[in-house]
Image (tube, rainbow, N blue to C red):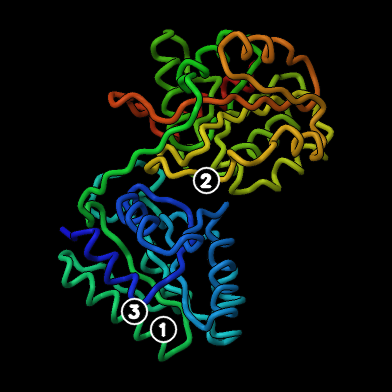
């Protein structure tokens, strides 16, 4: 196992800038990196492509490569700038990718990571990006890092380091916010207000897990819920696609602050759509809760003003269950947006969906097709 503090100290002798989207496999590394780099040198971006561009700007200004951290599911978001900006056939801008290898073959993981894990190396190879798998000891990890840095400097090209599960030892990190309402209780309060014509599309991570478990506790069918266990940031567009085709149903999107930030343009598409049966709920704990709790930038954004500007008909905010019930009960028609402020964290014994994604899809489509 790698001594995280020692490795990051070594890394910081050659890297002075980092940006990206948190990943559970990199949470200890990220925590240490955030505390080690100079103030203003560590950034959590909306998506991985933005992080690549941010690091490119840093390079243009300083002549030094930056580091971009991500889960392997974020490679897709990063490919456009990697190939059309950083590649040696275009501008030749070096950047070091630190990629958490979710779904590594032979390592048990969630279903949404299986395919991504199988093709992680092949994706990098197809893009012509040289990669290494991080060494398993502090010394070998430092050697891996040095080789990647040397390659970037000689070739003016991106390089990648793939990180296996459990690579880093634990680093103490405590994140919190000022809100007391548990997200699980907020979800329960929303469910209390929804009738049989309401169908939910929920975003990836803890929100979908808590929704699934709440249905189990209530003894209710999962047929009215589509759990978007992958595709971070796209749940609202899935929900919009359903709402446009099913105007007789009430469609509710359960979103998270990190997920909504990742593809914020989707909210503008919703506002411009003219859909009349859409309730967009963002559970805001100002953190990437499912992958370590690192802060998002949503704490400094007036998302209600943004939603109004995007074209939502009605916007509201809630901090407690009474506020939730008032807001959700007022959902009659139009494009409505509700921000619910919730505390960070989840129960340690929180379960995971016991249905396969394929079964969940089939049940949702069958229920949606019923009169």
| Mark number, residue 231 | 2
Q: Residue at x 50, y 31 (%)?
A: 227
Q: Secondary structure at mark 1?
A: helix
Which numbered marker is on residue 152? 1
Q: Which residue is mark 3?
A: 148
For residue 117, above or below residue 141: above
Q: Nearer the viewer, mark 2 or mark 3?
A: 3
Which corner quadrant holds the N terminus? bottom left
Disc 1 + disc 3, Cβ < 8 Å: yes
Marks 2 and 1, Cα distance to the nearest angstrom? 30 Å
Q: Secondary structure at mark 3?
A: helix
Query: Tag 2, which secondary structure?
Result: loop
Q: Residue at x 55, y 35 (%)?
A: 256
Query: In the rendered view, does 358 fall on the left or right side of 269?
Result: left
Q: Quadrant of the C terminus?
A: top right
Residue 323 spot, x, y in % from top left? 63, 12
Cα distance in 3D space between marks 1 and 3 = 6 Å
Quadrant in the rendering for residue 162 = bottom left
């Amino acid at each position: 196992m790698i001594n995280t503090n020692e490795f990051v100290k070594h890394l910081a002798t050659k890297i002075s800038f980092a940006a990206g989207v948190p990943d559970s496999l990199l949470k200890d590394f990220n925590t240490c990196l955030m505390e080690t780099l100079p103030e203003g040198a560590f950034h959590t971006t909306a998506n991985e492509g933005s992080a690549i561009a941010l690091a490119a700007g840093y390079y243009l200004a300083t002549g030094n490569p930056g580091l971009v951290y991500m889960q392997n599911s974020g490679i897709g978001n990063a490919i456009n700038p990697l190939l059309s900006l950083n590649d040696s056939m275009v501008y030749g801008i070096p950047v070091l990718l630190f990629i958490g290898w979710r779904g590594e073959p032979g390592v048990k993981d969630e279903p949404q990571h299986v395919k991504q894990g199988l093709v992680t190396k092949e994706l990098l190879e197809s893009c012509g990006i040289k990669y290494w798998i991080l060494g398993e000891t502090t010394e070998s990890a430092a050697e891996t890092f040095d080789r990647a840095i040397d390659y970037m400097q000689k070739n003016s090209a991106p390089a990648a380091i793939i990180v296996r599960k459990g690579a880093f030892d634990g680093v103490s990190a405590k994140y919190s916010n000022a809100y007391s309402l548990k997200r699980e209780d907020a979800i329960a309060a929303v469910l209390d207000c929804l009738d049989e014509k309401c169908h939910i599309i929920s975003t990836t991570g803890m929100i979908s897990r808590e929704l699934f478990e709440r249905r189990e506790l209530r003894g209710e069918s999962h047929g009215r819920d589509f759990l978007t266990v992958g595709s971070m940031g796209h749940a609202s567009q899935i929900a919009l696609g359903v709402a446009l085709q099913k105007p007789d149903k009430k469609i509710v999107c359960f979103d998270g602050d990190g997920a909504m930030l990742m593809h914020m343009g989707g909210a503008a598409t919703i506002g411009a759509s003219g859909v009349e049966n859409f309730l967009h709920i963002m559970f805001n704990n100002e953190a990437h809760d499912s992958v370590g709790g690192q802060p998002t930038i949503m704490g400094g954004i007036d998302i209600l003003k943004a939603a109004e500007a995007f074209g939502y008909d009605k916007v509201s905010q809630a901090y407690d269950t009474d506020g939730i019930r008032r807001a959700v009960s007022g959902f009659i028609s139009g494009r409505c947006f509700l921000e619910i402020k919730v505390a960070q964290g989840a129960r340690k014994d929180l379960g995971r969906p016991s249905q396969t994604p394929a079964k969940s899809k089939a049940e949702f489509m069958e229920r949606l097709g019923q009169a």
